[in-house]
Image (cartoon, rainbow, N blue to C red):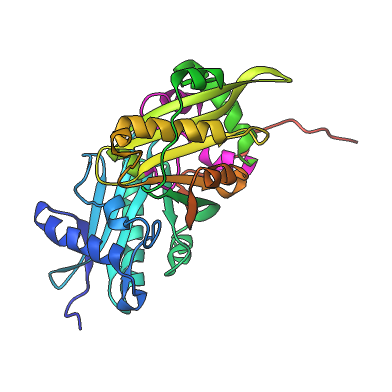
Amino acid sequence: MSTRPGRVRGARLTDLAALGELSRLCHQADDRESGARSLGLPVRSQVSVFRLFRMPLGAFRPSDQLFVYEEDGRLAGLARIERDPQRDEWTIVELDAIGMHEAGDIRLRLVQHLLRDAARRGAIRFHVACADAGGNVELFMQAGFIPYGQEHVLYQAPEVPLPRVTPEEAARAGIRPALPVDALALSRLYAQVTPPPVARLEAYRLPDWERSSQQAATPRSSLAPILRFAEVESYVQEHDGEQGTGIAGLLHVGVAREEQPHYLRVMVRPDHDATPLVRYGLSLIGERSGGRGRGGRHDQGVIAPIRTYEAPVDRCFEECGFTNVATVTLLMKEALVRVTEPALVPVTR
């Protein structure tokens, strides 16, 4: 039994070894009755979560935050936050705790502490993605978060051969690198794909879409943190339709620099076939990762998030050898209060 109440504090260099072990135990715990709790991202057997999000050291930036829960000189909880200074947003990447009966309280105290710290630093939004298990969704809703969507996590095993798409074939399909001048067209594409309530919550601006062509993955996904370990490239697909030539699809390709899966993210208009973009993304992964020299193998596989409202894009991935390995819930909390814009209304006498 604890002899004194625990406390939440910032992590120190002397904590790093213990934090690495705590993170590993929580992410690799198959038996949840052991008292280990995490965000449950994103799978069990096909992809090692600890390898995918192994932290707290990897790619840690000075602007990021790392909090621990200490009790009787022992670390029993960890919260890791990545900050986007461009949008003043915080993403909770890791929230771990160990304790048969206390893990839920420990994680809630960590979340409440980081929200108070963020208020002093001017954070506008908070994001988190988690499995709907272990009380995750209920914990964040208790802290003021709202669930606004779900994503399927698709995975292609290393044994699946990668297709080859030549630059000439990509050009004939209208695929080219994304440019900052595509910002307005990408914003319109996003508005076509995304339900208005979700678009209002995520609140992307034109500068965000301009950054999408420069190592920034807009729109975000539950797997965005792994892009710190990847070389990110963005491509668009132009399409001639009844309304003239326009951008019908967006592709993000993240070729892993570490021992983790590569990343694909595709967003297309509802009436557009996503298969050419998926195949081209897989072809780029094969070229960039050297998979061609290993008979098309890519040792860590490929992982792709798909919003549930983006169907039938998931069927295009399944035709290319992907399988659905998890479903995660997206939650967000805003620190600002939305105010309705003033408007004139008709008055009858």
110 w.r.t. 270: above or below: below
The picture places residue 299, in percent across and down from the top left corner, at 30, 46
The picture places residue 234, in percent across and down from the top left corner, at 43, 27
Residue at the spot 42% in from the left edge and 70% down from the top edge: 134
The picture places residue 84, in percent across and down from the top left corner, at 35, 37
Residue at the spot 37% in from the left edge and 24% down from the top edge: 214
The picture places residue 140, in percent across and down from the top left corner, at 44, 60
Is residue 53 visible in this depiction of the protein? no
Is residue 279 visible in this depiction of the protein? yes
Task: Say if the magenta span includes residue 39.
Answer: no
* Horizontal arrangement in the rendering, residue 309 relative to residue 142 (left or right): right
Q: Quadrant of the C terminus?
A: top right
Camera-nearest residue between 16 and 230: 230
Residue at the spot 70% in from the left edge and 31% down from the top edge: 343
Q: Quadrant of the N terminus?
A: bottom left
Camera-nearest residue between 286 and 312: 286
285 w.r.t. 131: above or below: above
Residue at the spot 58% in from the left edge and 39% down from the top edge: 200
Task: Say if the magenta span includes residue 204.
Answer: yes
Q: Residue furthest bottom?
A: 1
* Horizontal arrangement in the rendering, residue 105 relative to residue 70 (left or right): right
Q: Which residues are magenta?
A: 196-224
Q: Residue furthest right?
A: 349
